[in-house]
Image (tube, grey):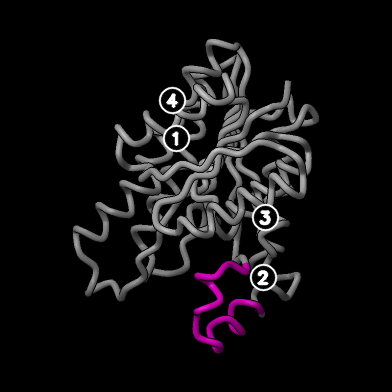
Amino acid sequence: MSKVVLVTGSSKGIGKATAIEFAKKGYNVVINYLTDENSANELAEYLQKEYKIETLVVKADVSNEKQVQNMVNQAIEKFGKIDVLVNNAGIAIDKEFEDRTVEDWKRTLEVNTIGTFLVSKYASENMLKNKSGRIINISSTNGINTFYPTSIDYDASKAAIINLTNNLSIQFAPYINVNAVAPGWVNTPMNQELPKDFIEEETARIHKKRFAEPEEIAKVILFLASDDAEYINGTVIKVDGGMM
């Protein structure tokens, strides 16, 4: 019986690359999106055609508890289980510090941190029932080292994900391994819109002298879901090319 992975925020960027990597390994894939329905459906069709696996596309705001419950229930109804959860959905609202609002903070924390908690909470019920599962949370190097006051709420949300990862690894032991990946700069659509001079400055601070490709992050996520990572739990893996 094929394994099943649920990837939140998987219509583009790291989430899309992750869905593809798991499909290559024969996983059935639950594709979650909030706004880009066309991209989600196109990805589903591609995975089915290219890798001969089954997919499920579900619209859900990960910060909305009822929508999360519905998404998990749909996945279990279709596939009978969830073997791997990748908490990838996230947002960043970059503004100057003095322009940042309480509403910005609330929305960022709701999606990035509370969303990670909610999907983990409901997906873990099935994993614990089966006494097996993997949860991989997507944090950021911004949650480890803070460089940019313009992303102060994003940084706080990603630091909270690291703490949440540690707590969940205790809560769900010994049946579910919970780990986090902390990417640095990645060539995602959002980052490609940054000012050219800023990209050049940041690239100069990276040992590898380039941004990561989404596939490079996805392969680390896939590794943490594999049998080779059976003894890795409560860990954060930086994937930042040697960011100074």
Q: Which residue is mark 2?
A: 211
Quick one: label 1, few (<14), some, or many (20+) residues within 10 Å?
Answer: many
Residue depicted at 35% across the width and 40% down the height: 114
Label pair 3/1, CB-CB below 8 angstroms: no
Q: Earlier in the sequence, mark 4 or mark 3?
A: 4
Q: Quadrant of residue 98?
A: bottom left
The secondary element bearing badge 2 is classed as loop
- Circles 4 and 3: CB distance less than 8 Å? no
Q: Amino acid at mark 2?
A: Phe
Q: Quadrant of the N terminus?
A: top right
**Image-quadrant location for residue 212:** bottom right
- The quadrant in which residue 96 appears is bottom left
Q: Secondary structure at mark 4?
A: helix
Q: Which residues are magenta?
A: 187-203
Crowd tier of the residue under label 4, counting other residues whose Cα lies within 10 Å: few below 14, some 14–19, many 20 or above: some
**Circle 3 residue:** 239
Residue under label 1: 164
Q: Which residue was labeled with disc 4?
A: 73
- Mark sitting earlier along the chain (3/1): 1
Amino acid type, mark 3 = Val
Amino acid type at image mark 4: Asn
Q: Give the CA distance from mark 1 to mark 2.
A: 27 Å
Are circles 4 and 2 on residues that touch, CB within 8 Å? no
- Say if 170 sits above or below 158 in the image: above
Q: CA gap, disc 3 to disc 1?
A: 19 Å
Q: For the residues marked 4 and 2, what is the alpha-carbon distance in whole angstroms?
A: 37 Å
Was residue 47 drawn as part of the magenta stretch in this picture? no
The residue that appears at 50% across and 80% down in the rendered structure is 194
| Label 3, residues with CA under 10 Å away: few <14, some 14-19, many ≥20 | some
Q: Nearer the viewer, mark 4 or mark 2?
A: 4
Disc 2 or 3, which lies upstream in sequence? 2
Residue 58 circle label: none
